[in-house]
Image: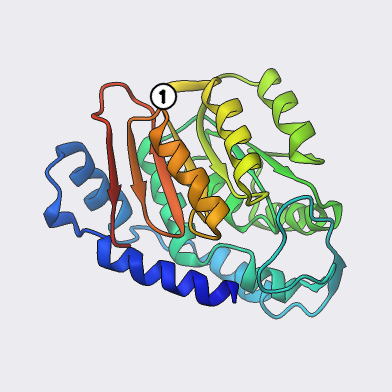
Amino acid sequence: MKLIQIIIRYLKYLIQAKGKYNLHSPFLYKIVSQVILANNTKDEREISRLRAQLNKNNNAITINDFGAGSVINESKQRKIKDIAKNSAKNSKFGMLLYRIVSYFKPKTIIEIGTSLGISTSYIAKANSNSKIYTLEGCGETIKIAEQNFAHLGLRNIEIIEGDFKNTLEKTISKIPKIDLAFIDGNHNKDATIKYFNLLIENMNENAILIFDDIHWSNDMEKAWEEIKESTKVTLTIDLFFVGLVFIDKKLSKENYIIRF
């Protein structure tokens, strides 16, 4: 039933979404053309090969999930290949994260929801001068992510283990102002809004927030609407599977739905 609802939401998104030639904002047109819809200028073959290996890994681990859980698999015992296929962002969205980080060059980055570390790897590869603090609740998943980071030679990542409601605020209090946040954990309204409120008070004025699965459920759609309406938010871009939030006060207050 949940999958059918997501399909219906996606069809609605396709009807509402605009292409880049329908945009009048110079800033938005530039971002859509040079970042969102740009051709991948660098093929991250290492991450693609790693993903392929994970997709074939039949080993099972025990998932400790503090969040809303999985639509695909509710079992606590999951094969690594199933997590890689169903939980990790595909290469299209991985490269989107890569292009965003490569273009804006954020220095301090927070990721909520490490999983196997695929998204983290795209972010870390895009700017080796950045520092990524990635939060994950599942210890078994962290072990796999750490192996993946070592395999890729990534040294600008720090993993923080524990329930996000305990680790996020502590992490924020110990680091510089945040330039980019990728929120991909605990997909429910109350948690998402709490993360948003904690993060936005500690972000640089031209920072970006990226929310995953904004149409995953009615609850997440309500969270997305509340975020869009926030007076601290200027420009938002709905790409269906992810939502981009800009807080730069030099930008006009606009909400866009872009076909991706």
Residue displayed at 26% across by 60% down = 17
Left or right: 10, with 87 as reference point: left
In the rendered picture of this protein, how many numbered marks are placed on residues? Answer: 1
Is residue 184 shown above or below 78?
Answer: above
Between residue 55 and residue 247, name the one nearer to us.
247
**The N terminus appears in which quarter of the rendering?**
bottom right
In front of the other: 242 or 221: 221
Q: Reply above or below: 150 against 179.
A: below
Query: In this rendering, is residue 235 above or below 260?
Result: above
Residue tagged by mark 1?
232
Q: Is residue 169 above or below residue 220?
A: above
Residue 15 placed where, x, y %?
Answer: 26, 67
Q: Is 13 or 44 nearer to us in this picture?
A: 13
Residue plotted at (66% across, 69% down): 71
Image location (x, y in percent) of residue 226: 46, 38
Query: Dot 1: what SS?
Result: loop
